[in-house]
Image: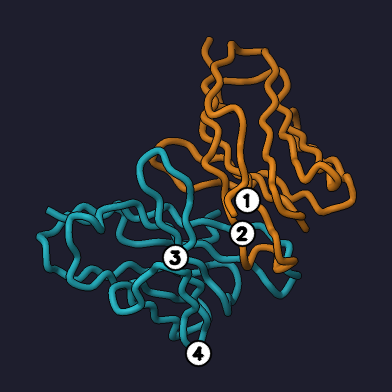
Chain colours: A orange, B cyan
C-alpha cells in the first residue's frame, strides 16, 4: 500500500525551511528518502530504521516515528539546489531495499 | 563516480519494435537489480526484481512476456520491451543495491531511459 506524502508541492524562498511528511497505514521497518531532479535519476538521501532514529546530512535531516508510522524530512535554510521531487520509499516487510514502495512525491521549488 | 550505468538514455521508435535497455553495476557485483517505471509527474513503480542466474520476480500486473528481463552476469541486467506500443512510452529506471552490506542499503539508480513509441 503506497505511503502518503504531504504536501504534494511546496514553494520556498532561499533560506526558508520545509517539512515533508511520509505516512503509512501499515507498520514500517524502515523509510528511505530520495530526491529526483527533473529528467534525472533519483538520488539517495538517507535511510531511517525503526527506533525513532533521527538522521542528518548537512541541512537536511529526517526522523522516523514508529508509533505514528510516519517519517518526516526537514530541510533547513533551503538552497536553490534543494529543488526537486522528494520521494519516500517504505519497507513494510523487513526486506529493506529489496521491496520498497514509493510515495507519489513532493515537489519542492526553491526560488531566489 | 557513477555506480550504475544505464543505456540508452533516449529511444524513439515505431510501434511494434522491441527495445532493449541495459543496466550495468560499475562498483560492485549485483546479484539483484531492480527495474522501475515512472510516468510523468508520478511515482516510481517497481516492475520487477532481476536475479542473477534465475528468473526475475515480477510485480503484480506486469506482463512477463512483454517485459523480458535477463540478468546473465553479476554486473549486467537487461530489460527488453517486446513489440512496444505507444502506451509503453515511459521513463524506465534501473537500480542496484549492495546487498552484501545488508538489506538496508541505498539503491543506486541509473540515469534512466526515456522510451517514446510512435
The residue carrying pointer 4 sits among few (fewer than 14), some (14 to 19) or many (20 or more) residues within 10 Å by Cα, namely few
Between residue A90 and residue A23, name the one nearer to us: A23
Callout 4 touching callout 3 (CB < 8 Å): no
Q: Mark 2 to mark 4: distance in Å?
A: 23 Å
Do the residues at pointers 4 and 3 share their chain?
A: yes
Q: Mark 1 to mark 3: distance in Å?
A: 15 Å
- The image shows residue A64 at horizontal and vertical percentages of 81, 43
Report the residue marked by disc 2.
A100
Seen from this angle, which residue lies furthest bottom? B53
User: Quarter-wise, where is residue B104 in the image?
Assistant: bottom right
Report the residue marked by disc 1.
A89
Report the residue marked by disc 3.
B47
Residue at figure coordinates x 47%, y 56% from the top left: B45
Seen from this angle, which residue lies furthest front? A25
Between residue A55 and residue A96, name the one nearer to us: A96
Looking at the rendered structure, the secondary structure element under dot 4 is: loop
Do the residues at pointers 1 and 3 share their chain?
A: no
Q: Earlier in the sequence, mark 4 or mark 3?
A: 3
Callout 2 touching callout 1 (CB < 8 Å): yes
Do the residues at pointers 3 and 2 share their chain?
A: no
Between residue B62 and residue A39, name the one nearer to us: B62
Task: Please identify, in this view, whether the residue under mark 2 or under mark 4 is nearer the observer.
Answer: 2
Task: Name the subunit of mark 1.
Answer: A
Callout 2 touching callout 4 (CB < 8 Å): no
User: Quarter-wise, where is residue A105 in the image?
Assistant: top right
Looking at the rendered structure, the secondary structure element under dot 1 is: strand
Mark number, residue B53: 4
The residue carrying pointer 3 sits among few (fewer than 14), some (14 to 19) or many (20 or more) residues within 10 Å by Cα, namely many
Callout 3 touching callout 2 (CB < 8 Å): no
Q: Mark 4 to mark 3: distance in Å?
A: 19 Å
Looking at the rendered structure, the secondary structure element under dot 2 is: strand
Q: Mark 1 to mark 4: distance in Å?
A: 27 Å
Amino acid at each position: 500500500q503506497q505511503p502518503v506524502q504531504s504536501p504534494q508541492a511546496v514553494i520556498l524562498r532561499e533560506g526558508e525551511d520545509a517539512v515533508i511528511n511520509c505516512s503509512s497505514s501499515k507498520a514500517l521497518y524502515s523509510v528511505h528518502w530520495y530526491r529526483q531532479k527533473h529528467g534525472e535519476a533519483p538520488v539517495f538521501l538517507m535511510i531511517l530504521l525503526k527506533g525513532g532514529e533521527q538522521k542528518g546530512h548537512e541541512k537536511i535531516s529526517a526522523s522516523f516515528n514508529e508509533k505514528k508510522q510516519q517519517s518526516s524530512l526537514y530541510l533547513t535554510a533551503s538552497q536553490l539546489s534543494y529543488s526537486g521531487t522528494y520521494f519516500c520509499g517504505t519497507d513494510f516487510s523487513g526486506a529493506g531495499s529489496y521491496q520498497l514502495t514509493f510515495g507519489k512525491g513532493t515537489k519542492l521549488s526553491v526560488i531566489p | 563516480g557513477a555506480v550504475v550505468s544505464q543505456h540508452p538514455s533516449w529511444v524513439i521508435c515505431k510501434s511494434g519494435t522491441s527495445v532493449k535497455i541495459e543496466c550495468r553495476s560499475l562498483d560492485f557485483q549485483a546479484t539483484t537489480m531492480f527495474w522501475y517505471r515512472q510516468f510523468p509527474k508520478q511515482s516510481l513503480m517497481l516492475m520487477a526484481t532481476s536475479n542473477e542466474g534465475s528468473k526475475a520476480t515480477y510485480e503484480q500486473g506486469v506482463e512477463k512476456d512483454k517485459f523480458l528481463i535477463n540478468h546473465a552476469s553479476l554486473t549486467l541486467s537487461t530489460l527488453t520491451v517486446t513489440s512496444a506500443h505507444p502506451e509503453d512510452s515511459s521513463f524506465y529506471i534501473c537500480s542496484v543495491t549492495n546487498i552484501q552490506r545488508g538489506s538496508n542499503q541505498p539503491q543506486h539508480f541509473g540515469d534512466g531511459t526515456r522510451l517514446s513509441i510512435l
